[in-house]
């Protein structure tokens, strides 16, 4: 009996040990088709690919791959809505989107904050581990890119979801300022910081970026699609313009537009300059030195803006869907913008209506790069800032204005007589030069101007309801500290 | 002469005598008659008579005989005591499977219902669950449609999860098996079809925590134990079971014929001033006209005849079993070829099973099982009835009632009637003489040329080694594999249909689902002092699953004559990529104790570690107790003991978990690959929950089992309560948090409670005629008690339409609809009720000066001074629950001599169905309509349920605005199964050397008594979804079957 019991116990223990001791590692399977967050900063290649992912999120068709620029234009008076399709912004054009409007109000907010979170997770991950993996220089470069992208996103969000800085000097409600990465639930609640606080963060990020970004990259395409020092400087000029801080705008822009007279170009970092033919900026390979930052597109699925998000789809009629035609009462009606101006060549009459037909004319699969900022804008920003801070007609401002005009219309010499005329001429030139690049709303908001009526859409003044967008309804329902506009 | 036995102390004695007979009155010899509690006794003689001298304190006599149920008789003052013995009720001597072991049914304190394999054999099913409806309390089965081999909705005591599966754990011969639909095509592929129903011996369904806690983290939905047939020692027995059956569709809605359709649609077009129904040269000219075929006859197509057929099926099973004292085996082979009610929907299974058990010596037993099954699930035209298919363009269910009857499948020249690449909508059915498109796809070229098939090769095998070194200790080690290889093949022709825009589309994908299980147990069984029965079990188990998938999708044929994946295509893509793995490591124990079969106690505990969860180990347990009052001496001595022979009180409580369907990597946050201008990115794309845990269900079960008149009448009543917590819900975060997905979190809670009653008996029992009857009644109340912060409701879509809403305080998956107020007799407009219940009228076409939404007096409808319309989000109400409140079955068997008649009725009461197809049947676009539109409103004063027909109106019918016009009570009583059989007499068979033969004819779904206007109130457009039951949107109906069969034993 005893022997039998011993025998049983040994057998039982043996079987038990064999079966329970091995295979413990099977309890913690490692995902084989994706990288877990525990190891995503383990190699330099993974870190580099995460840098690209921040741009990928920024470049979504719902944001700077298309809809961010489109929103910036269709709010203004230059375009008329042709398709009354809510999916393609009919309510944004009509200045009456609601918090539940999915296609712009909700989707742009969600995509922008997703991209912000990607940047925040990257910055946190670099501090925890990634910096030691790639080394200090690259770490600074990458962190510079992360903060620049984040700053650009906040800047764009402020233009649509918050009152302009000029309205109360930035004291009005701004945005929830997310600055740390979130991977878990429970972090939904965050109140809005003021507009001024958001601008302060933007500038802090761009200043860091200016200090830490590389001067340039090895190829033209990288210089166009990745941030470098001059990118930060150019964006800072845009930020200070938005804040009506003209002296600071001058300081920044002068860093890359240092000359007193034409020809103007950046003398440090990437040598940005106006192209002889403005059309080349918008044609393959889209990587001239005039483009400071553009979003690249290819034919591969997932690497282009996606259906009904593309700039060409909205503005081109021959190669796109012509969602919006040009308003004859808008800038194209300006007599001073001569027919012989090269920029008129972007416009065409199709089916008896004028369209911005040829700026983004790639057609399917819409691989036109989506512009974020280019040198001509920085020149005009500097011109406006100089004009506003100097009495009379500032010489460099006038030179910058004429450089932009004469690049496309060699025969016209603009000669505004007064400071006011100069400022107005510069504002007009911005409308001509940057048509379809998402800047009209930016210019109207920063100056607290009335959004003019167009077609059947009403005008809206800065005191009217709906001057800026409402907050996404999803944010209102899920963030208990959020307040609507 | 009787033999008298004298006990030890013979005192002045009484003598008692009598006759013992069987239930038919025949005298029984050799029956033992013993004074209870003593060894004093005698046996009956060949006339069944006995005579016994009683000791002084004799209280009762016990009559017992082999294969007969023992009975007791109080002696009292009588001197003549007769007894009638009936055949041992095997159901009480039977064992049920309880997980890693068995238990006698009468010793159970947990709640386990048993269904015999014979009840489901020889029925026209593909997998066993389809035949379980109405056969056990607490079990609700819904066959979702007539698509062959679709997994039925299988609910034990209500729906027990929201995001995970509510289907129970299936254990076959002690091994957990794959279940669910493994097909990736339009054919359904239920993995449980690999178990040939004719090979099943018993199905034991464990419902409460005490019975299921031995399976711990997987037990919250109940556990179903399948035992396949095993050999018995003796001469080899061969049996053949075969059947042939015919299945037809029933309940197809009656739609307009060609002339009615043409006239009705032209009338509706004339009612819409925005439609050009008069100027053939103008744009949008809308005119319907009939056409004639090549012989000059009017084309009047009944599309139901094109899509449906009478399916012919046959089923053959041959098995041989036998053995000697040491080894027994069971071998079976089966072939089943079934045709569904939809053309080209077929199911073919070939399977082979071999079970062997061999006792090598006193200590060692080995055994094993090999089972291989090949199933072909075939489909050409999508049925539109599987989950996610409700609005498929090519769905057969919808094609039948929305395609115009005044066009035919072929043009007069014999080619397919399709529009191709002209100014008209190409790739739609040809419009013939109509001026507008009158259908989506033409089903015929798809039926002829498309394939959407899934083939499963399923190997389920195990081997075990059992040691019994001492009589009270059994050690067993069992190793099992379950390999399921699924081969999906889709071909879509470039001629017409979904493949036309792609110029031909072919996909082939392979899914490899492999699983091994290794369980070791030690079981201790001992009876102490003839009173204390103790049984204890300890064990451990490992369960490892891997799932791999890969495949090809190719598009754009280089030659239209090709129709296989391997031919010439232009565009290659990958398809069907999948990678998953998980691992479960457990240890468990159980103790069963009873004292003199009067007081029972049992406890289970299991510790599970699962790779998909954060807190790697969790413990689950269940305990139960029972009291067999009828065994108490006070009961036996009272008069009640003569009437009530079993009176068991039982109760159980425990906590079990649910993991069914959880993803393998939910605890990880991951980065996926993408592109930025052609360069690789690593993008954060999933936020996991590193604290993810099991769902936990606390179950209470209290019940009583009564046996009366020596178990001639058995009553069971149970009260159950499942309190489910930590339900996994995908909780949305605020967008500014920037998280890419809703994070799975353990936040929800829900309960199920109700009653179960089972009344079974033999009201009539005589030599030539008997009647057995069983009535099952189960009630269920389900309520969601908590969701998540920010998640106040869960809306679940049926593809493009959402009518299912789950919210706190309501049953899961209730219908969320705008209330219908009828049709206004003055204007013919649809009336709907706003949130406050006030009527609002709707007109599709708005004449100048009028409004789309008006009050009954014609003024514009406004809320707070603003003109708005009625919307589902704003004005919808929780209209009704979709899970039945009462359900069950009524099973009766009548036997007259050699004839048996079995009638099974199933019923479900207290629930609603959203008959979405009804919206389609009243859609005023080109869609064909139900004949009741002929009674539509036409002039002021008309009273009708159908509003004034206005061409293009898809709001008044409930398509654009889901409304209660299409919601109906689903209550039904179904004549589920009627079987008439004749068992040949032994004398006849002996001449042919056949040991048994039985002929039978049966019918399934012969009649439904219901007010539901749709085809069948047992329906689901959303498969086994938890939150979207009770929706019938474009499903094909169920089939009605007549079957002839034969069982022969040799």
Image (spheres, coloured by chain):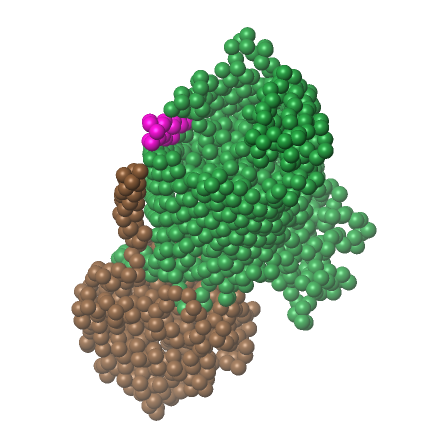
Chain colours: A brown, B green
Whether residue A354 is visible to the viewer of this picture, yes or no, is no
Q: Is residue B653 above or below residue B202?
A: below
Viewport quadrant of the N terminus of chain B: top right
Q: Residue at x 38, y 28 (%)?
A: B357
Residue range (magenta):
B353-370
| Direction top: furthest residue | B991
Q: Which of B1028 and B905 is in front in this view?
A: B905
Residue B644 location in percent, x, y?
A: 66, 39
Q: Residue at x 60, y 20 (%)?
A: B3
Task: Answer with left or right where residue B857 lies relative to residue B178.
Answer: right
Residue A275 location in percent, x, y?
A: 26, 69
Task: Answer with left or right where residue A217 lies relative to residue B758.
Answer: left
Q: Nearer the viewer, residue A21 or B490?
A: A21
The quarter holding residue B973 reads top right
Task: Answer with left or right where residue A321 lies relative to residue A20.
Answer: right
Task: Answer with left or right where residue A304 lies relative to residue A469.
Answer: left
| Figure label count | 0
Residue B439 location in percent, x, y?
A: 57, 40
- Chief secondary structure of the magenta portion: strand
Residue B145 location in percent, x, y?
A: 56, 38
Q: Residue at x 35, y 45 (%)?
A: B540
Whether residue B763 is visible to the viewer of this picture, yes or no, is yes
């Amino acid at each position: 009996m005893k022997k039998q019991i011993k025998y049983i116990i040994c057998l039982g223990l043996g079987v038990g040990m064999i079966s329970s001791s091995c295979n413990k590692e099977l309890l913690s399977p490692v995902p084989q088709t994706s990288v877990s967050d525990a190891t995503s900063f383990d190699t330099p290649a993974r870190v580099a690919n995460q840098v690209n992912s921040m741009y990928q999120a920024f470049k979504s068709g719902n944001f700077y791959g298309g809809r961010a620029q489109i929103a910036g234009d269709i709010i203004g008076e230059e375009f008329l809505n042709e398709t009354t399709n809510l999916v393609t912004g009919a309510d944004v054009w009509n200045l009456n989107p609601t918090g539940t409007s999915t296609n712009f109000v909700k989707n742009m907010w969600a995509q922008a904050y997703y991209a912000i979170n990607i940047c925040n997770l990257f910055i946190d991950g670099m501090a925890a581990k990634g910096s030691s993996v790639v080394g200090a220089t690259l770490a600074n470069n990458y962190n510079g890119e992360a903060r620049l992208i984040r700053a650009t996103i906040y800047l764009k969000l402020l233009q649509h979801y918050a009152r302009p800085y000029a309205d109360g000097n930035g004291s009005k409600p701004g945005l929830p300022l997310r600055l740390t990465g979130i991977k878990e639930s429970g972090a939904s609640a965050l109140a809005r910081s003021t507009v001024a606080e958001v601008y302060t963060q933007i500038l802090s990020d761009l200043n860091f970026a200016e200090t830490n970004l590389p001067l340039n990259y090895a190829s033209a395409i990288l210089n166009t699609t990745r941030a470098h020092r001059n990118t930060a400087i150019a964006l800072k000029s845009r930020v200070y313009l938005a804040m009506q801080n003209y002296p600071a705008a001058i300081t920044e822009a002068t860093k890359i537009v240092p000359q007193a007279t034409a020809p103007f170009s950046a003398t440090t970092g990437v040598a940005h300059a106006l192209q002889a033919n403005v059309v080349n900026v918008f044609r393959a390979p889209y990587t001239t030195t005039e483009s400071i930052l553009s979003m690249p597109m290819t034919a591969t699925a997932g690497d282009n803006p996606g259906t009904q998000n593309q700039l060409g789809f909205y503005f081109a009629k021959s190669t796109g869907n012509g969602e919006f035609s040009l308003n004859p009462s808008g800038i194209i009606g300006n007599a001073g913008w001569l027919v012989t101006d090269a920029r008129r060549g972007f416009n065409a009459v199709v089916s008896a209506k004028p369209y911005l037909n040829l700026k983004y004319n790639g057609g399917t699969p819409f691989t036109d790069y989506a512009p974020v900022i280019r040198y001509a804008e920085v020149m005009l920003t500097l011109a406006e800032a100089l004009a506003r801070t100097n009495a009379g007609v500032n010489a460099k401002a006038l030179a910058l204005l004429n450089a932009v005009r004469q690049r496309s219309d060699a025969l016209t010499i603009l000669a505004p007589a007064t400071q006011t005329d100069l400022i107005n001429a510069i504002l007009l030139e911005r409308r001509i030069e940057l048509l379809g690049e998402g800047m009209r709303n930016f210019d109207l908001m920063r100056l607290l101007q009335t959004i003019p009526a167009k077609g059947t859409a009403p005008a809206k003044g800065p005191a009217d309801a709906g001057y800026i967008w409402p907050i996404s309804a999803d944010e209102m329902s899920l963030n208990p500290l959020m307040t609507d506009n | 002469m009787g033999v008298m036995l004298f006990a030890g102390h013979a005192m002045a004695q009484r003598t008692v005598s009598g006759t013992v007979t069987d239930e038919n009155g025949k005298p029984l010899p050799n029956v033992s008659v013993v004074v209870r509690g003593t060894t004093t006794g005698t046996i009956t003689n060949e006339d069944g008579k006995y005579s016994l001298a009683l000791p002084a304190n004799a209280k009762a006599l016990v009559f017992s005989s082999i294969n007969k149920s023992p009975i007791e008789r109080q002696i009292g003052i009588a001197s003549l005591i007769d007894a009638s013995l009936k055949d041992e009720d095997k159901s009480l001597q039977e064992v049920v499977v309880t997980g890693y072991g068995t238990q006698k049914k009468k010793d159970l304190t947990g709640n386990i219902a048993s269904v015999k394999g014979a009840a489901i054999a020889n029925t026209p099913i593909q997998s066993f669950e389809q035949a379980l409806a109405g056969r056990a309390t607490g079990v609700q089965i819904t066959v979702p449609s007539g698509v062959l081999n679709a997994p039925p909705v299988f609910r034990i005591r209500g729906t027990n999860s929201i995001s995970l599966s509510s289907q129970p754990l299936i254990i076959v011969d002690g091994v957990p098996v794959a279940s669910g639909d493994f097909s990736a095509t339009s054919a359904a592929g239920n993995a449980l079809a690999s178990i040939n129903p004719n090979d099943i011996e018993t199905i034991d369904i464990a419902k409460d925590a005490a019975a299921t806690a031995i399976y711990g983290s997987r037990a919250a939905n109940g556990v179903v134990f399948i035992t396949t047939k095993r050999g018995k020692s003796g001469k080899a027995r061969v049996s053949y079971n075969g059947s042939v059956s015919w299945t037809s569709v029933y309940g197809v809605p009656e739609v307009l014929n060609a002339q009615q359709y043409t006239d009705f649609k032209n009338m509706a077009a004339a009612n819409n001033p925005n439609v050009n129904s008069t100027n053939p040269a103008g744009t949008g000219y809308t005119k319907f006209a009939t056409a004639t075929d090549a012989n000059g006859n009017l084309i009047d197509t009944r599309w139901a005849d094109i899509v449906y057929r009478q399916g012919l099926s046959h089923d053959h099973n041959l098995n041989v079993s036998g053995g000697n004292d040491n080894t027994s085996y069971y071998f079976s082979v089966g072939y089943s070829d079934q045709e569904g009610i939809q053309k080209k929907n077929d199911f073919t299974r070939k399977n082979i099973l071999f079970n062997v058990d061999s006792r090598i010596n006193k200590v060692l037993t080995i055994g094993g099982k090999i089972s291989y099954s090949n199933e072909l699930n075939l489909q050409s035209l999508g049925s539109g009835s599987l989950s996610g298919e409700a609005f498929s363009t090519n769905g057969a269910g919808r094609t039948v009632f929305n395609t115009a009857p005044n066009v035919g499948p072929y043009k007069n020249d014999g080619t397919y009637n399709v529009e191709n690449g002209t100014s008209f909508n190409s790739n739609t059915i040809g419009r013939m003489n109509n001026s507008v498109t009158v259908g989506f796809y033409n089903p015929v070229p798809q039926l002829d040329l498309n394939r959407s098939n899934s083939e499963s090769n399923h190997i389920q095998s195990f081997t075990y080694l059992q040691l019994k070194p001492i009589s009270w200790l059994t050690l067993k080690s069992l190793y099992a594999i379950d390999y399921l290889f699924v081969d999906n093949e889709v071909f879509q022709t470039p001629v017409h249909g979904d493949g036309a825009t792609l110029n031909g589309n072919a996909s082939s994908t392979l899914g490899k689902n492999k699983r091994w299980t290794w369980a070791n147990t030690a079981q201790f069984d001992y009876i102490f002092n003839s009173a204390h029965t103790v049984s204890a079990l300890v064990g451990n188990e490992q369960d490892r699953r891997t799932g791999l998938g890969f495949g090809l999708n190719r598009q754009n044929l280089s030659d239209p004559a090709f129709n296989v994946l391997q031919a010439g295509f232009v565009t290659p893509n990958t398809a069907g990529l999948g990678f998953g793995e998980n691992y479960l490591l457990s240890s468990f124990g159980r103790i069963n104790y009873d004292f003199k079969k009067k007081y029972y106690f049992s406890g289970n505990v299991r510790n599970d570690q699962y790779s998909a969860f954060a807190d790697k180990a969790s413990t689950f347990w269940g305990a139960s107790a029972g009291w067999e009052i009828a065994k108490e001496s006070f009961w036996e001595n009272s008069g009640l003991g003569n009437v009530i022979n079993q009176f068991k009180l039982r109760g159980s409580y425990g906590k079990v978990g649910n993991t069914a369907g959880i993803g393998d990597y939910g605890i990880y946050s991951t980065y996926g690959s993408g592109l930025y201008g052609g360069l690789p990115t690593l993008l954060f794309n999933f936020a996991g929950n590193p604290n993810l845990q099991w769902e936990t269900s606390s179950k209470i079960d209290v019940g009583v089992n009564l046996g009366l008149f020596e178990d001639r009448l058995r009553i069971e009543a149970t009260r159950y309560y499942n309190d489910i917590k930590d339900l996994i819900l995908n909780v949305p975060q605020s967008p500014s948090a920037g998280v890419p997905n809703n994070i799975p979190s353990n936040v929800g809670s829900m309960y199920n409670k109700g009653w179960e009653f089972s009344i079974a008996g033999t009201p009539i029992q005589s030599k030539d005629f008997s009647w057995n009857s069983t009535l099952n009644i189960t009630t269920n109340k389900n309520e969601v008690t908590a969701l998540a912060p920010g998640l106040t409701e869960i809306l679940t879509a049926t593809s493009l339409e959402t009518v299912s809403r789950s919210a706190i305080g309501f049953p899961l998956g209730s219908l969320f609809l705008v209330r219908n107020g009828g049709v206004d007799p003055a204007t013919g407009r649809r009336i709907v009720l706003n949130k406050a219940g006030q009527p609002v009228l709707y007109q599709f076409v708005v004449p100048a000066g009028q409004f789309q939404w008006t009050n009954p007096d014609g003024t514009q409808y406004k809320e707070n001074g603003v003109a708005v319309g009625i919307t589902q989000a704003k004005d919808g109400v929780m209209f009704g629950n979709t899970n039945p409140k009462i359900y069950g079955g009524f099973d009766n068997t009548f036997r007259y001599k050699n004839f048996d008649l079995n009638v099974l009725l199933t019923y479900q009461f207290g629930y609603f169905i959203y008959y979405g197809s009804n919206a389609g049947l009243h859609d005023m676009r080109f869609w064909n309509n139900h004949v009741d539109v002929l009674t539509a409103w036409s002039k002021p004063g008309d009273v009708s349920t159908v509003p004034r027909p206005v061409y293009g109106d898809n709001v008044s019918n409930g398509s654009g605005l889901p409304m209660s016009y299409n919601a109906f009570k689903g209550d039904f009583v179904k004549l589920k199964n009627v079987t008439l059989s004749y068992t040949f007499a032994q004398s006849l068979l002996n001449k042919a050397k056949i040991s048994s033969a039985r002929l039978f004819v049966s019918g399934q779904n012969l009649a439904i008594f219901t007010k539901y206007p749709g085809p069948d109130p047992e329906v689901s457009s959303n498969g086994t979804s938890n939150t979207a039951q009770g929706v019938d949107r474009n499903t094909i109906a169920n089939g009605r079957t007549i079957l002839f069969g034969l069982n022969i034993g040799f």
